[in-house]
Each structure stands twice: as structure tokens, then as C-alpha cells.
């Protein structure tokens, strides 16, 4: 089988957009995933997701300068689409950080290789549980479907659809707000705990409230988180199911 230069150029453009998208999604291209695996996944997706039609050996090739511009455009498109997909995970990370503030776990921060950020063990519990929910509802399948649709809505080597940037910014604000809303129950429980400890310090000054409050706030945070998951699970599912729509916001003209 003879592969023309034009076919190879087209394949590399598809591969470039896919790689620029999946490296922003923790489940597919997190920093804890080896580069060999990410590149192999990108090659497989480029072969499977895009319907290929053999080009004749005499098909016109793209010039060096024009091809460099096309590669740069695919990187920009893939980066913005990947950012839109990563917004949900960023909102979850924001919610976990907000919950962990004042919970007593902040003194022992650890590095999360999946998200490339450090956080407390409390953050990790919330983020890992939310990621499990993402996989249970087949969110990774939804992402792959949306990735394939980006090539239908915006073919390879097309112009940049700047009309979608405003919608993407609105989605960013919406998901940041949603992340804070997810954290509100735990944050409210911790604030009430601080108020109770403050009143205890006024009533009984001889009590070492600081040392008493550390284990109390840990227990309160864990109990509030366990009760919160029963309430916010539908919100997490809705957030994950909106990822495909968010991915297509930028590429829609």
C-alpha cells in the first residue's frame, strides 16, 4: 500500500489535534501517564476516529509554510477543546481545595500526578471519588465521541472559529461557580464548627481549643463529605455529561 505525502500530512494534522486535546484530560493524558502511552493512544485514535479515504499518489501536498500554519492552528484548536473538557475536572479540583481549607488536612499536602497539582489527602478523596463517578457513567466514551465530532464540525486545516470563545468563557465561569456550589455543604459545616469552637473558647478559656479543634474538624469534614456525596452526585453526573457539549462550543461556527 502506497501512502502519499498529502495523506501523511493530513494524518499528522489529525494526530496533532487529538494529542493537543487528550493531554489536557487527566483520564487520558494526565502527567502520571507515560509519554509512550499518550502518543500510542493518540495514534490509535487518529486511525479509528476519523474516516480515512485514500488519496491518490498525485494529490497536491501542502507547502512548508502553509503546513506549519496548519499545524499551529490544530494545536490552538486542540488546546482550547481540551481546556473545555478539563474545565469539569478543574471545577472538581477547586471544590476539593475549598472543602479542604480549614478541614485539618491542609498541614499534609501531597502531589497529585493526575492533575499535576498538590493538595491535601482530603482533596484527593474527593477528586478520586468524582473521577470514579466519571468512569462509571462512561464519561470517557462521551469524550471520545465529542472528540470525533470536532472533526465533523470543524474539518482539518479549517479556519479558527473565534465565535466560540465567548461561549467558552461563559462556560468557564459557570463551571467555576458550580465547583464552589459543590463545596458549600462541607464549607458550611466547617464554618459552624469554627463558630462552636470560638464560643467554647469564650465560655471556657482554660480549654485548649486549637488542639481540641484539629481532630474535631477532621471528623466533621469527613462526615460532611460522606453526607454531601449523596446530595451532589446528580450534580457531578450532570457536570460530566456536559463535557461533550463544552468541547464543541469552540469549534461551532
Image (cartoon, rainbow, N blue to C red):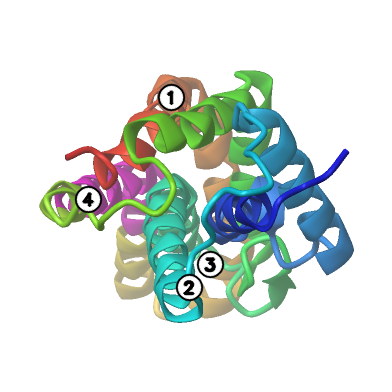
Horizontal and vertical percent position of residue 9? 61, 58
Residue furthest to the front: 58
Nearest to N terminus: mark 3 or mark 2? 2
Q: Nearer the viewer, mark 1 or mark 4?
A: 4
Bounds of the magenta segment: 170-193
Nearest to N terminus: mark 2 or mark 1? 2
Nearest to N terminus: mark 3 or mark 1? 3
Residue underneath mark 4: 168
Seen at 45% across and 46% down, the residue is 85
Secondary structure of the residue carrying tag 2 is loop
**143 vs 236, nearest the viewer:** 143
In the image, which disc is placed on residue 241? 1
Could you tell me if the residues under marks 2 and 4 are in contact, i.e. CB atoms within 8 Å? no
Residue underneath mark 3: 213
- Measured in 3D between alpha carbons, the distance from the residue under mark 4 to the one under mark 3, in whole angstroms, is 42 Å
Horizontal and vertical percent position of residue 58? 62, 49
**97 vs 207, nearest the viewer:** 97
Quadrant in which residue 232 is drawn: top left
Residue underneath mark 2: 63
**15 vs 54, nearest the viewer:** 54
Q: Quadrant of the C terminus?
A: top left
Amino acid at each position: 500500500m502506497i501512502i502519499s505525502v498529502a495523506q501523511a500530512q493530513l494524518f499528522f494534522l489529525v494526530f496533532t489535534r487529538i494529542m493537543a486535546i487528550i493531554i489536557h484530560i487527566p483520564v487520558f493524558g494526565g502527567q502520571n501517564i507515560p509519554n509512550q502511552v499518550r502518543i500510542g493512544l493518540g495514534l490509535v485514535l487518529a486511525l479509528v476516529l476519523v474516516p480515512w479515504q485514500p488519496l491518490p499518489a498525485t494529490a497536491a501536498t501542502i507547502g512548508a509554510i502553509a503546513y506549519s500554519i496548519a499545524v499551529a492552528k490544530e494545536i490552538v484548536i486542540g488546546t482550547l477543546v481540551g481546556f473545555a473538557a478539563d474545565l469539569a475536572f478543574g471545577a472538581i479540583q477547586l471544590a476539593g481545595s475549598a472543602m479542604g481549607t480549614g478541614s485539618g488536612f491542609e498541614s499534609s499536602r501531597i502531589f497529585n500526578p493526575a492533575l499535576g497539582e498538590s493538595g491535601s489527602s482530603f482533596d484527593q478523596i474527593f477528586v478520586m471519588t468524582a473521577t470514579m463517578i466519571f468512569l462509571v457513567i462512561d464519561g470517557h466514551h462521551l469524550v471520545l465521541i465529542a472528540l470525533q465530532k470536532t472533526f465533523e464540525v470543524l474539518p482539518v486545516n479549517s479556519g479558527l472559529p473565534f465565535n466560540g470563545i465567548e461561549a467558552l468563557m461563559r462556560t468557564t465561569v459557570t463551571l467555576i461557580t458550580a465547583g464552589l456550589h459543590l463545596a458549600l455543604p462541607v464549607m458550611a459545616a466547617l464554618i459552624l464548627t469554627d463558630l462552636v469552637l470560638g464560643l467554647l473558647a469564650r465560655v471556657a478559656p482554660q480549654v485548649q481549643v486549637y488542639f481540641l479543634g484539629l481532630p474535631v474538624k477532621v471528623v466533621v469534614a469527613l462526615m460532611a463529605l460522606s453526607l454531601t456525596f449523596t446530595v451532589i452526585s446528580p450534580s457531578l453526573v450532570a457536570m460530566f455529561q456536559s463535557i461533550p457539549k463544552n468541547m464543541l462550543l469552540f469549534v461551532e461556527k
